[in-house]
Image: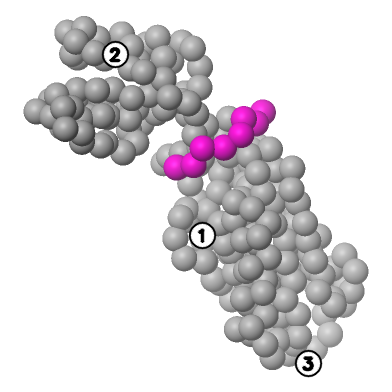
């Protein structure tokens, strides 16, 4: 969960949190090792390239592409010595055109590096375009993805004895729950709601019914939160 600036987008798809995802293809004796990383900024994306240059120091090419931000405003690519337009751009297109649902291409905060070990057979410009595009697309098909949504966080102060029951009932009602903290006098449940006025009104009504009007949600701000796809 991270607080971020407002954007026009209210949701997008990204890699699930965890270690970098790796997948390898062999195409006409050349090895194409694809590494995907969840990257919230350009520094993370560039660190991935630098780290793989050190790890695969004997490889001929370390081509890269990344797309960052809820609105996907940051997009970069590099051919790293391959003929112009045969590696970085096909990789970037594989990222930005990836459909995460029918008719929806909203993948972001993802950096991709394809490390190539030349196998002695020339692929030609068209072959390189297909190889780099296929390398990233295949990795994305296998990598774990999640949806990130901009949600409005609200605090709900309740007695310690009621916290577990209320949290379960709110989850059962379809609410997204963030972390719960326990203070000296009460427990603070954090409820994440769609960033819409009607959602807050409906949630307040539900909370009033569950607590007999003893407490109410207090809006705190918005944050980007991973939710199940």
**Does any portion of residue 168 appear in the rendered image?**
no
Q: Residues within 10 Å of mark 3 (few under 14, many from 20)?
A: few
Q: Main secondary structure of the magenta part?
A: loop
Q: Secondary structure at mark 2?
A: loop
- The verdict on residue 56 being magenta is no
Badge 3 or badge 2: first in the primary sequence: 3
Q: Earlier in the sequence, mark 3 or mark 1?
A: 3
Give the residue pinned by disc 2.
216
Assign a secondary structure to mark 1: loop
Residue topped by disc 3 = 120
C-alpha span from label 1 to label 2:
40 Å
Q: Nearer the viewer, mark 1 or mark 2?
A: 2
Residues tagged 3 and 2 counted as in contact (Cβ below 8 A): no
Q: Which mark is residue 143?
A: 1
Residue 159, above or below 89? above
- Structural distance between the alpha carbons of marks 3 and 1: 30 Å
| Residue 30 as seen in the image, left or right of residue 204 | right
85 vs 51, left or right, is right
Decide: is 180 above or below 174: below
Q: Magenta segment range?
A: 1-9
In what quadrant of the picture does the C terminus appear? top left
Q: Are marks 1 and 2 in contact (CB under 8 Å)?
A: no
The residue under the point 67% across, 87% down is 57
Say if residue 182 shows up in the picture: yes
The x, y position of residue 145, in whole percent, is: 50, 51
Q: Classify mark 3: helix, strand or loop.
A: loop
Cα distance in 3D space between marks 3 and 2 = 68 Å
**Circle number at residue 93:** none
């Amino acid at each position: 969960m991270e607080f971020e600036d407002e954007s026009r987008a209210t949701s997008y798809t990204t890699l699930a949190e965890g270690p970098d995802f790796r997948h390898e293809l062999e195409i006409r004796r050349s090895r194409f090792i694809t590494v995907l990383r969840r990257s919230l900024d350009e520094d993370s994306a560039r660190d991935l390239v630098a780290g793989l240059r050190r790890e695969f120091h004997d490889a001929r090419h370390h081509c890269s592409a990344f797309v960052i931000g809820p609105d996907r405003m940051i997009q970069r690519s590099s051919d790293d010595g391959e003929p112009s337009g045969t590696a970085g751009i096909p990789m970037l297109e594989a990222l930005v055109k990836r459909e995460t649902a029918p008719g929806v291409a909203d993948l972001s905060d993802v950096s991709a590096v394809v490390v190539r070990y030349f196998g002695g057979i020339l692929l030609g410009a068209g072959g390189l375009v297909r190889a780099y595009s296929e390398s990233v697309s295949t990795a994305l098909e296998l990598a774990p993805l999640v949806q990130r949504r901009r949600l409005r966080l609200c605090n709900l102060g309740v007695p310690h004895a009621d916290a577990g029951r209320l949290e379960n009932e709110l989850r059962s009602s379809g609410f997204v729950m963030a972390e719960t903290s326990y203070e000296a006098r009460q427990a603070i449940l954090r409820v994440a709601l769609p960033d819409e006025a009607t959602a807050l009104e409906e949630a307040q009504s539900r909370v009033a019914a569950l607590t007999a009007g003893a407490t109410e949600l207090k809006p705190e701000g918005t944050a980007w939160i991973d939710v199940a796809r």
